[in-house]
Image (tube, rainbow, N blue to C red):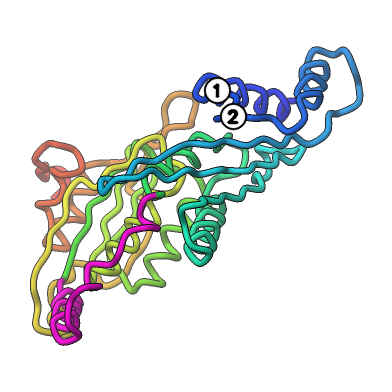
Amino acid sequence: MEQIQLQLQEIELLQCMYPSKDEFRIQDVTVLADMYQYVNGEVDTPPRNLEFTVQFVLERECGGNLVFQVDAFFPIDYPKCRPVLSVKCGQLLRDQNKELNRDLREYVCTLENGEICMINVLQWFQDYGLKYTQKTEYTNMDETTAKGKINAAKYIFSRYLIHSHHIYGKDKRRNILEWAGELSLSGFCLPGKPGCICVEGLRADCEDFWSRTRLLNWRKITLRHLEEFQVEGEAEIEKLRCFSKFEEMNFDPHTCHGGRENIMNKGKFYQFLVAHACQHIFSYFFNIEGQISKQEI
């Protein structure tokens, strides 16, 4: 019952966002009627799975529009389980459509079960749909110039400071730890409210981490600050690291609001940063200057 109610809420929202029949179409409207009867207690038999299509247009700066069609299938237990989605765009080549669908599946897998997700999915298209028609930066360069630019970018050390409204979900925290390890990044993740993430390493790896992380289902997440340094080789990168590894930290959090919100001990967090010679990043997370009290020394 609860899952069907959430599905209906999401459908009503989509109908408001896409009022035209050309934009939003339910494959079998009798399924929708059955869903309302079920939640109103008029029938005992659960309804069939809901299928619908959303169509929208993205405008390109160079002219011409891209028309995307997203076909969605809601299992009866959605949003406890993930929806089945596919997308096609007549203006894209076959390989581009394949890449788009592959990236869509990967994004959907990052979403937490139990939460409706179609609005996030459609926003993902708004943010990234046009990239599948864009050429790479090096397409029109000669080989020597392109290699030179790639090698120059390869040895740039970066430090990304990411601030989230909160970090609670186990799936998010696991993804953050796994991705940082996979990309050989060092730094830390502070779960709770707010959530703070610091990653450092090669610029390409930090960019990859941020691209993956921001696609997770967040209430709010921002890249507060980034630092970059040109280096001669990978050995210099190790010298610039403030942290030897990436780990999840916990600084005596206390709970409030019924035990849901974990608020960190900012004093101990600042001590931790001082110990790693990077206390300057404290103000980027909290918009205040940190200091150590006499009791904490």
Residue 218 locus on image (x, y percent): 42, 40
How far apart marks 2 and 1 lie (CA) works out to 6 Å
In the displayed structure image, the side of residue 250 where residue 112 appears, left or right? right
Q: Nearer the viewer, residue 233 or 141?
A: 141
In the displayed structure image, the side of residue 203 where residue 134 appears, left or right? right
Q: Which mark is residue 20?
A: 1
Q: Label 1 is placed on what type of residue?
A: Ser
In the displayed structure image, the side of residue 128 where residue 229 appears, left or right? left
Magenta span: 130-156
Q: Nearer the viewer, residue 222 or 278?
A: 222
Residue 272 locus on image (x, y percent): 21, 56
Residue 93 locus on image (x, y percent): 48, 62
Q: How many marks?
A: 2
Q: Vertically, is 260 above or below 104?
A: above
Residue 241, quarter of picture: bottom left
150 falls in the magenta region: yes
Please give the name of the residue rendered at 34% of the width and 50% of the height, measured from the top-left corner: 190
Q: Secondary structure at mark 1?
A: loop
Q: Which mark is residue 24?
A: 2
Residue 260 locus on image (x, y percent): 48, 32
In the displayed structure image, the side of residue 143 where residue 166 appears, left or right? right
| Residues at discs 2 and 1 in contact (Cβ within 8 Å) | yes
Q: Vertically, is 265 above or below 258?
A: below
